[in-house]
Amino acid sequence: MKRWPLGLILGGVVSALALSLMGCGNNDTAAFTDPGPQVAKVNDAVISRWAVEDLIARQGPMARVSRDDALEELIDMVLLRQAAERRGLDEDLEIQRQLDQLRTNVLANHYVQRFMDEQDFTETALRAEYEAQIAAAGDEEFRARHILVDDADLAAELIAQLGAGADFVALAGEHSTDTTADRGGDLGWFQLDMMVTEFAEALAQLSPGQVTAEPVQSRFGWHVIELQETRALDLPAFEEVIEALQQILANRALQSELELLRQRATIERY
């Protein structure tokens, strides 16, 4: 029978056995026993059909894992768990902390998934969000380039050089601290809301071919900006973005849920 290296299956088995491990070393929590159909028993521990199917599913469709192979690996993992318990590892404080965090992660992730699955938005709500997103995006795209430096005086000097006929690409390559320096400061096509406010506001005042008359300061430093061209934004139809709109609304609902949970909770920070 084919046997897998244990290291390849640890991730999948952790989820299959996580809840049973939670009971180890904790007198207030009973060890979990899957009530589903059982396929094996190792000493006093049972292995359910669900654990086998879950392990197979987690290997991915290309793994071609048989149920027999999966079962044998689960048996090995249960034997190792029992050996760890006999050595008292379930009483180790650091291990208990890891198991507690694992339980928190599993439960939190499943709560979020079920909450998101339960969200159901009307077409009216989706269309309202679509219109809001369209309004926020505007109807234009911009192509620009910039030179980013750390000093306002240097930025002002570069603007003066450009006014005297200096080449923007050459100056960007020589002076810009941004990652776009090697392509002459070219930022490609973008919408204004993708840029920091100071940059976007300055760019919106320019005409194609125009450079900012003064250095523009943002949290990144001092910018010298040239607007190269604009074009009408090709907006997607409502039907093309329904799933994205549902995700936006679901994420917003989740944030509201978290805020409500915080309001209802007693939280003490030390």
Image (cartoon, grey):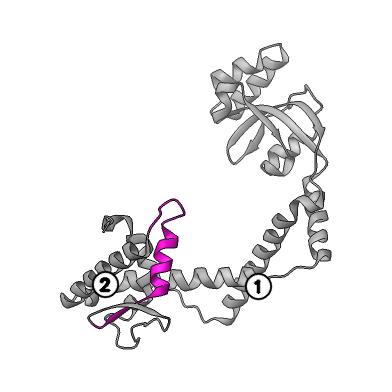
Residue 63 drawn at (x, y percent): 40, 53
Q: Residue 54 colored magenta?
A: yes
Label 2 environment density (alpha carbons within 10 Å; few <14, some 14–19, many ≥20): many
Q: Give the range drawn in magenta.
A: 44-65
Disc 2: which residue: 78
Label 1 environment density (alpha carbons within 10 Å; few <14, some 14–19, many ≥20): few
Tell me what residue is drawn at x 22 percent, y 75 percent: 82
Dot 2 and dot 1 residues touching (CB under 8 Å):
no
Which of 50/16 is in front?
50
Residue 65: image quadrant is bottom left
Check disc 1 and report its element: helix, strand or loop: helix
Tell me what residue is drawn at x 84 percent, y 65 percent: 124
In this rendering, is residue 63 above or below 55? above
Which of 59/69 is in front?
69
Disc 1: which residue: 118
Which of pointers 2 and 1 lies earlier in the amino acid sequence?
Answer: 2
The quadrant of the rendering that contains the N terminus is: bottom left
Q: What is the three-letter code of the residue carrying label 2? A: Val
The quadrant of the rendering that contains the C terminus is: bottom left
Q: Is residue 135 left or right of residue 59?
A: right
